[in-house]
Image (cartoon, rainbow, N blue to C red):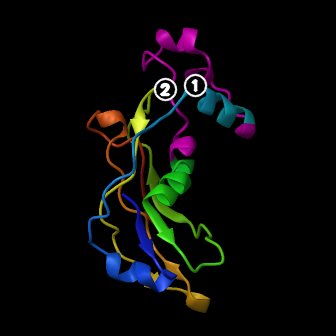
């Protein structure tokens, strides 16, 4: 289900309202390998499935920052602001990766936004909704509180 608002100011009344959730999206080894190439983080727990089988997670796992990077496309599937020139990531506070996200797991974004506040030139600082646990395993693979 996608929520559509006309302007950034239309985000403010959404605080605490249920927006639904995006479809589940599987995190593939190809995505993890691409992220490893882009960032230079080629640690074996991410890119070596054979070695990872005998490692601490039993399989390769997504980079924590990859799970964070998935916020942008997931949020775009959940929420549309029609009359906006661009969106800019302002930043995050207290980012944590409390559990690994095994390759092949599914992720989605959903829940009520926690509120927002007006920003300069008609903009809004608006945190994304909380994310349900990765792959239904009961523990979030990423949590972040936007500034």
Circles 2, 1 touching at the beta carbon (< 8 Å): yes
Q: Nearer the viewer, residue 58 or 34?
A: 34
Q: Which residue shows up at 54% across the image and 53% down it? A: 73
Q: Is residue 90 left or right of residue 78?
A: right
Q: Earlier in the sequence, mark 2 or mark 1?
A: 1
User: Considering only vertical position in the picture, is 85 above or below 119?
Assistant: above
Give the quadrant of residue 84.
Answer: bottom right
Q: Can you tell which mark lies on residue 100?
A: none
Q: Is residue 129 left or right of residue 138?
A: right
**Quadrant showing the N terminus:** bottom left
**Residue 7 visible, this orientation:** yes
| Relative image position of residue 130 (x, y in whole percent) | 35, 57
Query: Considering the numbered disc 1 on the image, is that residue within a helix, a strand or a loop?
Result: helix
Q: Which residues are the magenta region?
A: 38-67
Q: Does the magenta segment cover residue 57?
A: yes
| Relative image position of residue 117 (x, y in whole percent) | 44, 83
Q: Does the magenta segment cover residue 122?
A: no
Task: Please name the residue that numbered disc 2 is placed on.
Answer: 103
Q: Which residue shows up at 34% across the image and 53% down it? A: 21
Q: Nearer the viewer, residue 99 or 69?
A: 69
Q: Which residue shows up at 68% across the image and 33% down it? A: 34
| Relative image position of residue 127 (x, y in whole percent) | 43, 68
Q: Which residue shows up at 56% across the image and 8% down it? A: 50
Distance (Cα) linking label 2 and label 1: 6 Å
**Residue 41 visible, this orientation:** no
Q: Can you tell which mark lies on residue 29?
A: 1
* Crowding at mark 2 (Cα within 10 Å: few <14, some 14-19, many 20+): many
């Amino acid at each position: 289900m996608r929520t559509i608002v006309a302007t950034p100011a239309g985000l403010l009344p959404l605080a605490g309202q249920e927006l639904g959730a995006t479809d589940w999206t599987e995190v593939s080894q190809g995505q993890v390998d691409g992220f490893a190439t882009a960032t230079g983080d080629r640690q074996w727990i991410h890119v070596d499935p054979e070695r990872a089988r005998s490692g601490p997670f039993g399989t390769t796992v997504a980079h924590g920052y990859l799970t964070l990077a998935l916020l942008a496309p997931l949020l775009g599937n959940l929420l549309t602001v029609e009359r906006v020139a661009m969106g800019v990531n302002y930043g995050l506070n207290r980012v944590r990766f409390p559990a690994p996200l095994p390759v092949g797991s599914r992720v989605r974004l959903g829940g009520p936004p926690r509120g927002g506040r007006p920003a300069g030139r008609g903009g809004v600082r608006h945190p994304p909704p909380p994310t349900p646990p990765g792959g239904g395993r009961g523990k979030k693979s990423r949590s972040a509180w936007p500034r």
